Amino acid sequence: MCFQMLRTWPSADYFFTDVCEPIAHSSICVKFDAFGQGMAKPTYLNPYSRWEWPGFIQNGLSMHRRNLLKASMALAAYTGLSGTGLFAAQAFAATADGDVEPFSFDMLKAQAKTLAGQAYVSNKQTLPPTLATMTPQQFNAIQYDANHSLWNDLKGQLDVQFFHVGMGFRTPVRMYSVDAAKSQAREVHFHPPLFDYKNTTVDKSQLKGDLGFAGFKLFKAPEIDRHDIVSFLGASYFRAVDGTGQYGLSARGLAIDTYAHQQEEFPDFTKFWFETPSKDSTRFVVYALLDSPSATGAYRFDIDCQAERVVMDIDAHVNARKDIEQLGISPMTSMFSCGNTNAACATPFIRRFTIPIAWPCGAAMASGSAAP
């Protein structure tokens, strides 16, 4: 099967293109570009995806590194190595505390393909009561300590912080810092000291072990720790802002059987790998592993944080675990403004209103099957 589709959304100032190459050996290779310019409201609830909310909050990571910084500068003076290179190496070493392991996009693609040949195993965890019973307001009160952001020591143009698990966000997402020059990665582990629970109801004594993270968000100078410009949170949701700081539509990594005669399926991004950018860069690369009962995927996001918009070049390699009737390649979300459960809308004139801004099934849809 081979198809190519182009959709534009001029009313929302949103643009998506996607290309799907022939399905072969249960694999679909997809490459598409996405960029957003100003779009609708900053907060969304997608009725099709239950508790997978696009995002709210402030979160990140690092440790005490002053001594390492001094040592790095001394090493630069002694060896003549570039300060940028040393800063990148420092961020890789100081922020992530996991063991060094090899990493490349080719390895990730191979991992996703191998995973597709195995039975699906959900990694959704049972959260401690203090997190599982949170309201959105309580969840939003958990703040990430900006001093522990991923690239804090770079003092550069970009930085990453992480979202706490809790409420409906029960799937632990694993984060890794990547040294692209060495093709190595280290995991960034969850630790309660990374977060500020001061104004929350969280009982920290219940936070045992490595709970993982729920997602991440990106910041750009000069508002490096105040206003995020990219957010990945919940299933495979992601979105970005325009020049006014306004978030737009939420996109997904993949959508499966959203209007078929069976349960719809929205895969999860379960792991992210971040290439450390240079100090002055406003562009960086993040990789993601996607997993679900029906499919797996290896994704590469080349994220260009321009002055007036965020542009993403996305390379996706999707593998089918089983036959898929309907496949959303670059899905975007829709939502109800008024519904039957909203008393304010329950009038003879207003029964239900759906904002006509995106197809819940995706910007591109494929129907067919792939033999395992």
Image (cartoon, grey):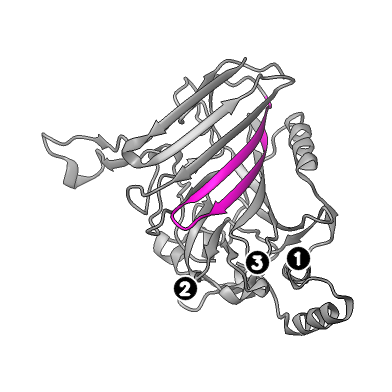
Where's residue 10, x and y in %? 34, 36
The N terminus - image quarter: top right
Tag shown at residue 236: none
Determine whether the residue tagged by mark 2 lies in a helix, strand or loop. loop
Helix, strand or loop for disc 1? helix
Q: Position of residue 171 (x, y in %)?
A: 60, 50
Q: Quadrant of residue 297?
A: top right
Crowding around mark 2 (Cα neighbors within 10 Å: few <14, some 14 to 19, many 20+) is some
Residue 355 sits above or below residue 321 on the image: below
Q: Looking at the rendered structure, which numbered label has been put on residue 92?
A: 1
Magenta range: 296-321
CA distance for labels 3 and 2:
23 Å
Within 10 Å of disc 3 (Cα), the crowding (few <14, some 14-19, many 20+) is many
Q: Mark 3 points at which residue?
A: 150
Question: Would you name the residue on which mark 2 appears?
Answer: 200
* Amino acid type assigned to the residue bearing label 2 in the image: Thr
Q: Residue 184 location in percent, x, y?
A: 82, 55
